[in-house]
Image: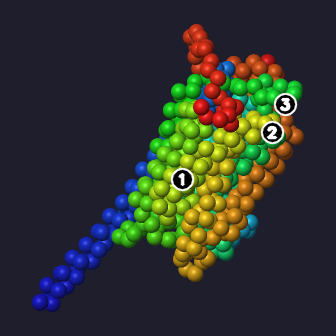
Amino acid sequence: MEQELAALTERLAALESSTAMSGTINSEIFYWWCTALMIAIHAGFLAYEMGASRVKNVLASGIKNILAFAFMVPTFYFFGWYIYLSFYNGLLPADDASGLPWELSMGPNLADNATGIFWAAFTLFAATTASIFSGAVIERIQTAGFLILAILLGSVVWILGGAWGWHPTGWLTVKFGYHDVGAAGVVHMVAGFFALGVLLNLGPRVGKFNEDGSANAIFAHNVPFTITGLMLIIVGFFGFLGGCIIYMPGEQWINIYGQPTTLSAFAFNTLMGMAGGIIGAWVKTRDPFWMMSGALIGIFAAASGLDVYYPPVAFALGTFGGFVVPMVAVWLEKMGIDDAVGAFPVHGIGGLIGVVSCGIFAAGYPNVDGMPPVSLWGQIVGAVTMAVLGFVPGYVASYILKVFGLLRVPDHIQEKGLDIVKVPVSAYPETYTPAPVNVATPAAAGTPAE
Amino acid sequence: MNTSPIDSWEGAEAYFTFADKPAVMMLFLLIAVAITFGTIIVAAVHEKHAYNNH
């Protein structure tokens, strides 16, 4: 009898060990595929930017975007992960700082199935922020200046926001109950406001504005490519949002703040927000470019509360965002700011709607470990923090680059085209015949829908 | 030439082949940093050169 009991105990221990290992490996696999899907975001931004560029700048825009991805990976390894894990209290590292590139967890380690896969997912979040910024500055930014700014945004600034408001012990979470599960603030607002800060110093593309301040439409050379790219970004966002929740082997999912949730909640509200955004933008603009941008806006407008909203709320928020944000693009142009792909309106304002509305539609939602519940005040504090955190470094760093002549491509080079000046191959080596041009442009987005 | 810090997986945790000593890890880390940021300097020089030629 004792022998049988000992054998049973041994088998039970083996079974528990096997189940635990299966859970660990399933978790690894989940984030592996989330990361792979997120590469579709970068592919989408690549297509989007190249399509939005004129023929003379197509490949230069593509190179810039590809390089943003390439430089994000090593720099996030060097210091991005360290910032996330160590700066959750503010601007100084915490006592338990970790994530430095010479730690034994930062490479092959049979005792650590988590660090690499989470580092990879966060690196792709970083690449997303750099891509958001990349689109705004096409056709007139120098590559070196762009790379410095992209690294600053992707491997320093947004991840600092992530440490503050997208971390279980970030100060915004602990002190204000800041709730932003889908990163409307920490990714989209930060990237959008960073882009705005840079645009003020970079200036518009040559020919965008007339002397009297009126704007000229600069047409995308390939609108279908741009729209397809936007759809690809939507695909990638399912990886992005999957990467925003924590797989707990053997237990219920939790969000990044430790509150229980489900992937099903994210599925409901992501799709409903996306659909609302498309419809809102369609009603406002009738423009397929804005309809697909509206899909993104809809997701961002619902992103902070993807885990808690009744899906029709996400739909209404998405519709509101999709309707309103194109008007911000028109206003921006009237202010003399040339945001080539609407990065600030779509991400900055779309994210702002998401963060603030969570304080209204999820107010009082409880937090764990005695932290404050969700509140409008906490969300406003978070939104202001993300806006300032994005705008100030973008403005200051681009100003310094401007002073050193590393920011803007000279006007005579812009007129000639960037591809012929610095790219050894041609995008369209055979005859390219421009098609007749239609009138639907972002500039027309503010006009009443027919 | 043997560049593996382990010869079996019994009790193995972190294992970085070749870079198995802090000094070597640091050397390769510095090389990676130099490549990353050195390339940006090269890009700036190349770009100025290209603009001046046009």
Secondary element at tag 3: loop
- Badge 3 local density, few (<14 within 10 Å), some, or many (20+)? few
Please tell me whether residue B1 is drawn above or below residue A50 in the rendered image.
below
**Seen in the image, is A140 located left or right of residue A85?**
right
User: At label 2, which amino acid type do we have?
Assistant: Met
Circles 1 and 2 on the same subunit: yes
In which image quadrant can residue A13 be found? bottom left
Report how far apart the C-alphas of labels 1 and 2 lie in the structure.
29 Å
Q: Position of residue A181 (x, y in %)?
A: 55, 61
Frontmost of labels 1 and 3 is: 1
Label 3 belongs to which residue?
A213
Label 2 belongs to which residue?
A335
Q: Position of residue A306 (x, y in %)?
A: 51, 59
User: At label 3, which amino acid type do we have?
Assistant: Gly
Secondary element at tag 2: loop
Q: Which mark is residue A316?
A: 1
Report how far apart the C-alphas of labels 3 and 2 lie in the structure.
9 Å
Residue depicted at 75% across the width and 40% down the height: A332
